[in-house]
Amino acid sequence: MKKLFVIVIASIFLFGSCNKDEDTNVLPVIKSNNGVFILNEGNFNQLNGTLSYFDTDSNIIHNNVFKNANNDNSLGDIVQSMVIKDSLGFIVINNSSKIEVININNFKTVNTITGFNSPRHISIIDDNKAYVSDMYGADIYIINIQNYTIMGNINMGKPTERMVKYENKVFACNWTNFAMPNVNNNTVQIINTINDSLVDSIVVTKEPNSIVLDKNNNLWVLCSGGYMNDELPALYKINPENNTIIKKYDFPSINTSPSKLEINGSGDTLLFFNSGIYKMQIDEDNLPLNNFIANDGKMFYGLGIDPQNSILYVSDAVDYTQQGYVFRYQLNGSAIDSFKVGIIPGYFCFKK
């Protein structure tokens, strides 16, 4: 969270050969079933958030696909996150307080879900319902993904951020207390998905910002330590069966801000930002000492890993006002290519 408030004009070094760009005013014809949605947040209150699509079979980037498919309509203000369920993509637009449901093959709007406060992330629970976290409110929304309505809420008592589902539980990070300064943002809360109720919580370090599940069904939670450097940042390994902490990894310096924890498709390699990209095997006893990909003046902002081939997608927000870039790497750190996308690219969703 610390570095989200730092705006640095970074120089752009483009390695390898850039992928071919398409005409951004023409709706592409997508012939493959494999690709990556890149969510470009846009600037606050400017309604310039956009959706890009990278076809991994043709290596062509298509920008502004939502706008081109929907009569030049804006996707909204702060395009936050996305999940795919069958042929539908659920795109959470934070400041516009809505979820845009699209057909992932032609990018056209199927429906729009409204009535949220400040939605952030979505977790599909089953064929009928999903949970939506909220940055400013104390509730998690329950949405009906068949008729696209809010059908209830779960009172969490504090804001929630990223979530992971394991069996009949959802683990939700309490990343921020910006809107509720009197609550502690140092817990992971646990929801029973059968009766949609809050049942437990796990105390961790301040600002748990991201969470993943590994191949052994252990949870990993990354905590920044607080916006004001209150505590040492930490990485936690948690048993989701009994909600206990298996191991805590403390970072060596309080003046760091690790974020964007991700895991590869085979569930054995963790990656995260911390002034560069760090890589760690799930059976390691200690945190990695050095990054394996340096930022080299780039403003790293979003991180994603293709679950099929473990190719890394890393976004560069540049100066937060102009179009950003996406860089692709092999899991060993070698550069593949790069391409230009929208303003503040922050999230990747993989179509398979």
Image: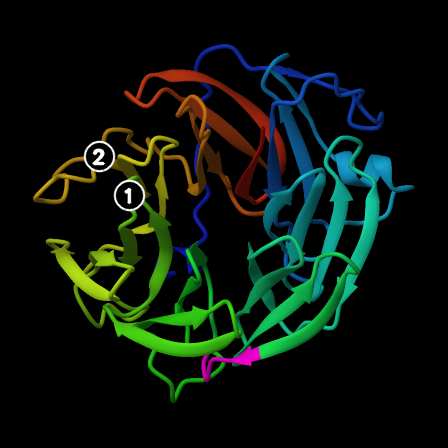
The residue at the point 28 percent across, 43 percent down is: 275
Secondary element type, mark 1? loop
Dot 1 alpha-carbon crowd within 10 angstroms: few under 14, some 14 to 19, many 20 or more: many
Locate the N terminus by quadrant.
Answer: bottom left
Q: Which residues are magenta?
A: 154-158
Question: Visible in this render: residue 131?
Answer: yes
Q: Position of residue 43 (x, y in %)?
A: 64, 54
Location of residue 98 by image quarter: bottom right
Reading the image, the residue beneath label 1 is 275
Mark 1–mark 2 Cα distance, whole angstroms, equals 8 Å
Secondary element type, mark 2? loop
Reading the image, the residue beneath label 2 is 291
Discs 1/2, front: 2
- For the residue pair 93 and 352, the one nearer the viewer reads as 352
Magenta span main SS: loop
Q: Amino acid at mark 1?
A: Ser
- For the residue pair 43 and 8, the one nearer the viewer reads as 43
163 vs 40, left or right, is: left
